[in-house]
Amino acid sequence: QVAEWRKLRDEPTVTVDGVHVELAANIGTPNDVAGVLENGGEGVGLYRTEFLYMGRDKLPSEDVQYNAYKTVLEKMEGKPVVVRTLDIGGDKELPYLDLPKEMNPFLGFRAVRLCLDRQDIFRTQLRALLRASVHGNLRIMFPMIATLGEFREAKAILLEEKEKLAAEGTQVSDSIQLGIMVEIPSTAVLADQFAKEVDFFSIGTNDLIQYTMAADRMNERVSYLYQPYNPSILRLIKMVIDAAHREGRWVGMCGEMAGDATAIPLLLGLGLDEFSMSATSILPARSQLTKLSQADMKELAAKALDMQTAEQVVELVQSIEQ
Ligand code: PEP
Ligand code: MG
């Protein structure tokens, strides 16, 4: 099997009926890029920038960040790199920010909420990203977007920083795609409206599942409710993909679900364009996807959407020959 996977390293991911999907990787540091290329990643679908901010005693400077982003973009040699702006808060703390303890950190002051408030932090990161953009194929993504207003505000700040850099005579790429993570149900429900304003979506199922099922992703006592295959989750994913495609936007997924062998046939059938996962999952996923027909998986997904329980969906997927 390993030998078969290795042969797929430089191959595109094309289904038996000729549909091309992208397999990208999730990374946390520039050092992870080597593994992405070794495993045949066609891009970086999620660069979690939190690690730049963690394990130190103060905020990383603009130059420290610029160097990290530039390194990743250069090493990826023109392949797309989706960088997620700071997603701190929730389970990820930064001691030096000295934020007050919250009753419900996952529902609290985190990610883009914090960035819109602490604009000094946000603007520094955006400047570093914009400066790095000339070194590769950069895509910027905002996490934890709950409303159109948040997206518009974050985008306006990005454009302000871009203009400032231009005024300073610093070169910035003109082809940076701007997208959002869909990990809050309100955003999935209004995906048709968001799709008119963003370049792409990336579905963050790790959080989307916890917020849809109201089940803390870290709490074992409610882990039985953490159900990727619950038809409600599949319907939300379908809403997002259909809304995006109506506007000609692409949709990725960067939660754990994207690399899950049981989910992959369903996601292909729902029309997902990009699957982003840990680097070591890419070749097994490519092997699986190249043996599937999207037309058949569309029928499978349609059946799954009409089921009542996650167990029924799993049984359905297991009933197909792979
Ligand atoms: C997600 O929520 O699915 C996601 C990819 O983000 P994180 O796991 O970093 O919260
Ligand atoms: Mg998340």
Image: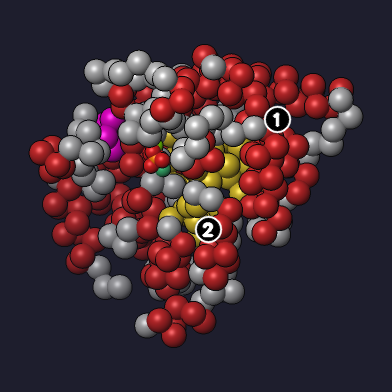
Residue 88 coordinates in the image, percent (x, y): 44, 30
The amino acid type found where label 2 is placed reads Asp
Residue that sits furthest to the left in the current view: 221
Neighbours of disc 2 within 10 Å: few (<14), some (14-19), many (20+): some
Comparing 155 with 58, the one in front is 58
The image quadrant in which ligand 2 is located: top left
Q: Is residue 212 magenta?
A: yes
Q: Is residue 117 left or right of residue 144?
A: right
Tag 2 secondary structure: helix
Given residues 77 and 202, the one toward you in this image is: 77
**For residue 62, side relative to residue 142 (left or right):** right
Q: For residue 141, which quarter of the picture?
A: top right
The image position of residue 71, as x and y in percent, is 67, 52
* Residue 80 visible somewhere in the drawing: no
Q: What kind of residue is marked 1? A: Arg
Q: Which label's residue is closer to the chain start, 1 or 2?
A: 2
Q: Dots 1 and 2: beta carbons under 8 Å?
A: no
Q: In the orientation shown, which residue stands out farthest toward the bottom?
A: 3
The one of 59 and 30 positioned closer to us in this rendering = 59
Residue 136, relative to residue 98: is it above or below? Answer: below
| Label 1 to label 2: alpha-carbon separation | 23 Å
Query: What is the span of residues highlighted in magenta in the rendered image?
Result: 209-213
Q: Main secondary structure of the magenta part?
A: helix
Mark 1 crowdedness (10 Å alpha carbons): few <14, some 14-19, many ≥20: many
Q: Residue 234: name its quadrant.
A: top left
Q: Residue placed at 53% from the left, 58% from the top?
A: 32
Which residue has dot 1 on it? 127
Looking at the image, residue 150 lies above or below residue 213:
above
Q: Residue at x 58, y 53 (%)?
A: 30
Which residue in the rendered view is the most extreme toward the right?
A: 169
Q: Which residue is mark 2?
A: 32
